[in-house]
Image: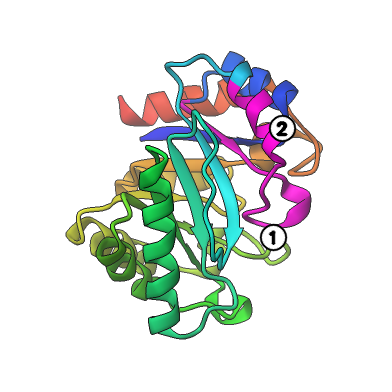
Amino acid sequence: MRLLVSVRDARDAQAAVRGGAAIVDAKDPRRGALGPVTPRMLARIRAAVPSDIPVSAALGDAATEVVVPRGVVYVKVGLRNVGGAGHARALAQRAAQGAAAAGAALVLVAYADASRAGSLPPLAIPDIAATAGARGVLLDTAFKDRGSLFDLLDVAQVAQWLAAARAAGLFTALAGSLGEPGLRTAHALGADIVGVRGAACDGGRSGRVSAARVAALSALVAAAVA
């Protein structure tokens, strides 16, 4: 299992790298679960991260056009306020094509709080992602005010979602206000990637990424894998 740390600027990115993050994810938490940073900021984040560490970028929800900046390996796109399967498939296909044209891979995002987010149920997303040509899927929370991923879905439901994603040939990622217990559960369930923001920051998700916090999370992930 690899640790992904979401960062909002180059300073955050440098702290994430010092702490041992396996993937650095560009995201502006002030703009929601998949809030994109500006193109200029994304370029600064990429420049602050060694070339051997992948950079991913959140591009928002229901994107009708995906513009992938240079140097980004993965792009995350969600389907908030997209309730119809046909519309979701069309959006996912366009996003996958846009990512592939820039040499990146699409990660389609499912929401544990799908009904509140106006999105399709989590179990509908793996098939849509695979059909569109995405490489992976992420199960996250659209809203950050009602607990973590495992407060919204029980372990059996998350395991079912992971199994569906694997059966579709996709890599899997879990996020959503996860702390130490959530990371342990994610590993036990066999997730490929676990994503954090608040747990890596001093002062919560709106604070600053702390190299020490990231190092502690990296050590936890390494111990779990070992």
Q: Secondary structure at mark 1?
A: loop
x and y percent of residue 87 in the render? 44, 80
Q: Secondary structure at mark 2?
A: helix
User: What is the quadrant of the C terminus in the image?
Assistant: top left
Q: In this figure, which residue is indicated by the disc labeled 1?
A: 144
x and y percent of residue 153 in the render? 48, 69
User: What kind of colouring is applied to the model shown?
Assistant: rainbow
Residue 43, placed above or below residue 103: above
- Observer-nearest of 192 and 24: 24
Q: Is residue 40 on the magenta stretch?
A: yes
Residue shown at the point (67%, 65%) measured from the top left: 143
- Where are the magenta residues, as a range? 22-46
Residue shown at the point (80%, 37%) measured from the top left: 207
Residue 6 placement: quadrant:
top right
- Looking at the rendered structure, the kind of residue marked 1 is Lys
Residue 55, placed above or below residue 49: below
User: What is the quadrant of the N terminus in the image?
Assistant: top left
Residue 106 located left or right of residue 116: left
Residue 39 located left or right of residue 134: right
Q: In this figure, which residue is indicated by the disc labeled 2?
A: 41
> Can residue 137 be seen here?
no
Residue 42 placement: quadrant:
top right
x and y percent of residue 36 in the render? 66, 48
Q: Is residue 163 on the magenta stretch?
A: no
Mark positioned earlier in the residue sequence (1 or 2): 2
> Can residue 146 be seen here?
yes
- Observer-nearest of 178 and 56: 56
- Looking at the rendered structure, the kind of residue marked 2 is Met
- Closer to the camera: disc 1 or disc 2? 2
